[in-house]
Amino acid sequence: MTSIFLVGPMGSGKSTVGRALARKIGYRFIDSDREIEARCGVDIPTIFDYEGEAGFRDREARIINELTMLPGLVLATGGGAVLREENRQHLMSRGYVILLQVDIKEQLRRVGFDANRPLLQTADPEARLRSLMEEREPIYKSVADAEISTDSRRMYHVVSRILRHLKKYDINLAASSVNEEPIERPASVSEPLRYTKAK
């Protein structure tokens, strides 16, 4: 069974679409950001506050390495997950990568004033989103097997387009038994957040 990995900017709908897609094909759904929060016991802004972005990216890389090895998974990754080469290699070599695209205006409407987005805690969220997109869009495209726009589209239509694409390219989506057991969490990943203020 080919796992499906969703990449793209914040606000592109990776979690919403991923959850619906997983239900449709009988796969497990995991959001890497939510998994990090569950294992640390705190939210992402707190991790950024105490460990900085570099500390968060270290945790993210360990999680992505672990999760991309699982079969029958729809994985929604964080917007910056593609920044590290090791993450890109794991995503490209272990599953089928779909880029969810969204324009800046729609992105701003969805997440521009979300207090849980540390990178957007600035006086000009729109300018920050544009800067992030300029930096990251070529990287997203470099890892993606397919690109799907979520602008002004109902979630149902986005999922349908993904399914048509997967069928067209004969991606193996053999029905799986949904495993409700929690993922085994190695000590290196499940350790609680250490409150060492990042310098």
Image (cartoon, rainbow, N blue to C red):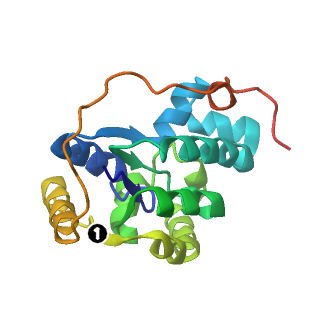
The residue identified by callout 1 is: 148
Name the side, left or right, on which 35 lies relative to 192: left
Which residue is nearer to you in this view: 101 or 32? 32
Task: Name above or below for residue 190 compared with residue 88.
Answer: above
Name the side, left or right, on which 89 lies relative to 26: right
Which residue is nearer to you in this view: 177 or 134? 177
The secondary element bearing badge 1 is classed as strand
> Could you say where residue 109 lies in the image, as x and y percent from the top left?
35, 58
Q: Please identify the quadrant where the C terminus is shown.
A: top right
> Could you say where residue 65 lies in the image, as x and y percent from the top left?
57, 46
Residue 84 visible at all: no
Picture quadrant where residue 29 is located: top left
Task: Name above or below for residue 120 compared with residue 32.
Answer: below
Residue 89 visible at all: yes
Q: Residue furthest right?
A: 199
Residue drawn at x 51%, y 66% as measured from the top left: 129
Residue drawn at x 16%, y 45% as measured from the top left: 24
Picture quadrant where residue 188 is located: top right
Q: Amino acid at mark 1?
A: Ile
